[in-house]
Image: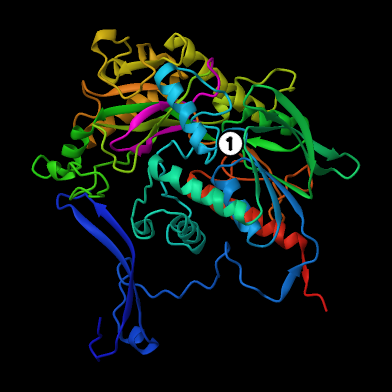
Amino acid sequence: LISSDDTPLNFELIRKSFDCRKKSARFVYVIDIKVPPHFINRSLLIPGSIESVEDPPNPSQIHPKSVGQSIITRPRVIIIGGGPCGLFCALALSRRGVGVTLFERGRGVESRGRDIGALQARRVLDKESNFCFGEGGAGTWSDGKLTTRIGKNSEPVRDVLRALIEFGAPENIMISGKPHLGTDRLVKILREMRSALKDRGVCIEFNTKVVDLLVDDAKGKCNGVKYEVRREDGVKEMKELEADAVVVATGHSANDVYKMLIQKGVEMEAKSSAMGFRIEHPQALINEAQYGVNQAHFAKVPLRKRGEDRDPLLPVADYRLAAHNAYVSPNGNDSYSCYSFCMCPGGQIVPTSVDENALCVNGMSFSTRSSKWANSGLVATVGTREYSAFQDSKGEISLAQAALLFQQSIETKAATMGGGDLVAPAQRVIDFLNRRVSEQSQLPETTYRPGIRSAPLHELYPPEMYQAFYNGLERFASQIPGYSGEHALLIGPESRTSSVVRVLRDSETLMAKGMASLFPAGEGAGFSGGIVSAAVDGIRIANSISKIYEVQQLT
């Protein structure tokens, strides 16, 4: 690339995305061009199109550079949870020479895959190894999206993407506007990451569930954990391990951990969230709605030979819909928004329960996104109004505890509606809007393998939330023809879009309020949402621990 005055210019492709919001669909590129200062002064800057930016000043946080300091004593750190937050925390700490032991209640991805196969094919649920628990966390078998709202071009995010590439992710995730790995790729990446962590001295223990914290009550300090080892023959062993710091990165489905933290006096608060359903359509319907009849066929994944990695001319169509203030209460005090969540083009709906008596579902897709079906969360906001109904008159149940009880009540009610055995309640969208139960024989085909049963999903949530769904669906049908048509199916509940509680932590040290040396982290603690933001929060925790134990260079 040469400027008008023959100055050579270096450029780098930062982001590539596909925009089909207008009639003329197009690819959109973000390009960084390095130019001399005098060129910037003479260029015509256009906000939003051509802007002047400086190189990011922060070095990589995963690969810290030597700054003339050292760790006088290596702290012993325990990380609870082997999801993206825990794994990236372990990675950052191990690269600083910190000793790390990581406990994961579930199995490694190889054995976990077999457990998930048994769940899908025979409805056999292992409460400790499933779609939520196990190496890689819930994100492993939940589509592998790498989109984030914390700044897709920010240096912390790019650090995470670079690390994923190091472990086998395709390099195009650095430039894709909607980077996506898929479950099949994530499994391979996790194996490589595990190997790298072990090479750096990280001790990774699967089938190991932390059941209690070791606490020095006089100092209000966490000194370690008590944990249960589940052997393959079913025998369980109780053990203890002391540490200088304990990181809690257990994800948003470990309700037993929340109860443990509350009993230990760790402070937490209720957090607004969103709940609803999975809505499923034929992928062809979404392709035609987004691209038009004449271009939709370009989004089909072509037949390919083994080992080939060919993409369609256009990405399989997705969507993002939102109806802000879809319902406002008559007194104006409460408002509810309705929106799509974690849309999975070419995907499938899966059971994400960790208990047979509490049902919840989610969406996922493989890297090719070649399924004939598209699904997305269809959710409405929930908060204090819904949670407070589960508080007692004596004030013994905090709002945070009530939030967990509300979530549990929805999942228990849904399991009853489905009739048990992980069968999910379902309803045609047309019938949902008319408050009538669908005929079982009229339910559309679905990707949810454990089975579906016709049920009154319009009665699953409080009336205010139903009205938000109703109004939202009406708006969305005007944006995507057929969205609320005869081929649209609701399956419920999508009840874990994010944690309903937040574990409070000090803004500087990131330690839990009410417990020194305990570091709540990631999505389960209420500080992230998704693979990338959870990984970034894990690195933040690692930085804080490193700072606490770092001293000036020895003389």
The residue located at (24%, 29%) in the rendering is: 483
Return the x and y of residue 420 as percentages of the image width and height: 47, 10
Nearest to the observer: residue 98 or residue 232: 232
The residue located at (35%, 86%) in the rendering is: 41
State which region is magenta. 329-357
Give the colour scheme of this rendering. rainbow
Total numbered circles: 1
Q: Identify the image quadrant of residue 276.
A: top left
Kindly identify the amino acid type of the residue bearing the numbered disc 1: Lys
**Residue that label 1 marks:** 271
The reply, left or right, for residue 35 in relation to residue 502 is: left
Q: Is 219 placed above or below 162 here? A: above
Return the x and y of residue 268 as percentages of the image width and height: 68, 37
Look at the image and tell me whether residue 464 can be seen: no
Q: Is 142 placed above or below 453 here? A: below
Look at the image and tell me whether residue 34 can be seen: yes
The residue located at (22%, 50%) in the rendering is: 310
Q: Identify the image quadrant of residue 264.
A: top right
Under circle 1, the secondary element is loop
Q: Is residue 330 magenta?
A: yes
The residue located at (39%, 41%) in the rendering is: 184
Residue found at the very far bottom of the displayed protein: 5
Crowding near the residue tagged with mark 1, few <14, some 14–19, many ≥20 C-alpha atoms within 10 Å: some
Residue found at the very far left of the displayed protein: 294
Q: Identify the image quadrant of residue 263.
A: top right
Nearest to the observer: residue 147 or residue 388: 147
The quarter of the image holding the N terminus is bottom left
Return the x and y of residue 361 as percentages of the image width and height: 44, 26
Q: Is 66 placed above or below 413 here? A: below
Residue found at the very far right of the displayed protein: 218
Q: Is 292 placed above or below 210 here? A: below
